[in-house]
Amino acid sequence: MATPPPDPQAETHEVSPPYEIEKLRIEEWAEGYDPQADLEAISFDNTEVAFRYKSDADLRKSLLLFNSIKYKSLVKIGPPLVSLALDLRLPVRGLINSYFFNQFCAGTSLETSIPRIEQLWQYGVGSILDYAVEAQKSEVGYNACLEQVLAAIEFARHREEVSYIAVKLTGLGSFAILEKAQQTGGELHGYDKIQYDHLVERLETLCQAAANAGQAILVDAEESWIQDTIDRIVEQMMARYNKERAIVYTTVQMYRHDRLDYLKELFLGMRRRHVIPAVKLVRGAYLEKENARAHQLKYPTPLNTTKAATDQLFNEAALYILERLDKFAVCAGTHNEESCRLMVQYTRDHKIAPDHPHLVFSQLYGMSDHLTFNLSQYGFRTAKYLPYGPLEAVLPYLFRRAQENSSIAGQSGRELTLIQKELHRRRRSAALKPDSYQLGHVPV
Ligand SMILES: Cc1cc2nc3c(=O)[nH]c(=O)nc-3n(C[C@H](O)[C@H](O)[C@H](O)COP(=O)(O)OP(=O)(O)OC[C@H]3O[C@@H](n4cnc5c(N)ncnc54)[C@H](O)[C@@H]3O)c2cc1C
């Protein structure tokens, strides 16, 4: 008998295993579609919605912060000054907490983060818990990080307001070992192999705990010279834990020009194994470092050479996933309005309910509230990436946020404009309230 020609659409015709949970959710998704929503124009400009969880005092602090970090020189000298002041035990903690830490972090521990988590949830915004301590350097440090993330999974077990737990592999094991594994194609021996195995075991422990607790876990993407190793490890976990639902998410950085192909291979490879692929889709955070290293070691940069190319790839990747949303889960980690608008438009055009269980939008805490809260208002599942940890330990995270806001063209400007607009709106609406028109009161 002649073999039939290969079916180019085979991936969409494949026979799916009986995923009862998934089926149930897909039915809910169809029912949840609201045709009325199509009539509303997509806009993220509603600052009343965006900032309703912030008091006037909070907004003024944000205004001061974003005004300061638009000065590159301040962002450059700030980190050493702050570190020195803390080392010298100068009384600056209150100031840093109030104007910097509280802007981007939820608290110093899980317990102190609870008010923020609950406050966001009041507006339908979930939380992604991120123990924001940066790369560790010892087995003791890796185990301590493991314990912290396990505690977060346990904490989240009975909290519907926590959507996901985030983890960085360089918090669970050595950067150098990940790099060596990449250079040797995984051929490690002796102590190197032991360290590598421990790292994998730690992630496995977390994935198992997340699966038991019914939580999902997002593994961050890092530098390209360790990312292939991270990909292999996370794919292994995904294949093990995503049989019935999306538990393990890998992260794909679309500033890399090879990532759309990777995303497609990931999808096909996982589907062949009847696994639900799940990704956090981002543009990528290590642009300058990647390009500098490629230049220094004289190899072609793995990144796109223009922002427009990155935008194009991000959007293509987002559409590729949305076209397969019943079998592909995505957390869109982006502050880019156009990408969010495109994704919202796609769901409308294809009658996908905004609260589809495979779709969530996420922005970092302290940034782009206009996207998070307006998307939530439209009925989309949204979650803030919520870092927490002791002040000294999260400083590198805070400095990166300051740098990002000063270096991404327009980011701090965009935040500033929105905050100013909201403060102005509040002043005007307070002035228009009847009790403001008391004798002698002059509205401003
Ligand atoms: C929830 C969440 C989770 C995240 N997790 C990760 C993670 O795990 N790993 C990680 O690396 N990043 C992560 N990020 C950061 C992310 O990768 C981006 O750095 C950041 O969100 C800014 O990109 P944007 O999509 O918001 O949009 P924009 O502000 O529109 O885009 C800025 C981004 O475009 C790209 N870009 C800028 N200029 C150029 C250029 N000249 N050429 C090519 N590309 C350019 C860079 O990636 C830059 O960060 C996360 C972000 C969020 C919101």
Image (tube, rainbow, N blue to C red):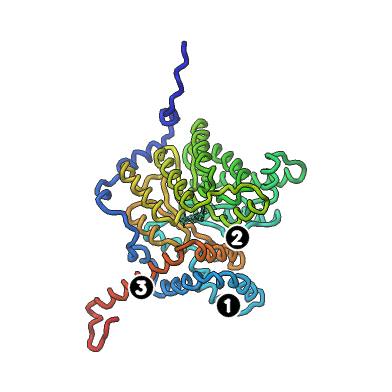
Q: Vertically, is 52 above or below 253?
A: below
Q: Quadrant of residue 29?
A: top left
User: Is 3 positioned to the left or the right of 378 in the image?
Assistant: right
Ligand 1 within 8 Å, label 1 CB: no
Ligand 1 within 8 Å, label 2 CB: no
Query: Considering only order in the chain, which callout, 2 or 1, is on the residue closer to the N terminus?
Result: 1
Compare residues 346 and 138 and report the one nearer the observer. Answer: 346
Instruction: Read off the residue under disc 3.
Output: 423
Mark 1 vs mark 3, foreground winner is 3
Compare residues 175 and 257 and report the one nearer the observer. Answer: 257
Label number found at residue 92: 1
Q: Amino acid at mark 2?
A: Val
Q: Amino acid at mark 3?
A: Leu
Question: Percent from the top left, x then y, of residue 57?
Answer: 41, 75
Query: Considering only order in the chain, which callout, 3 or 1, is on the residue closer to the N terminus?
Result: 1
Question: Percent from the top left, x then y, of residue 136?
Answer: 66, 57
Count of marks, rendered view: 3
**At 56% from the left edge and 55% from the top edge, which residue is drawn?**
287
Instruction: Read off the residue under disc 2.
Output: 133
Q: Residues within 10 Å of mark 2 (few under 14, many from 20)?
A: many
Q: CA–CA distance between discs 3 and 2?
A: 34 Å
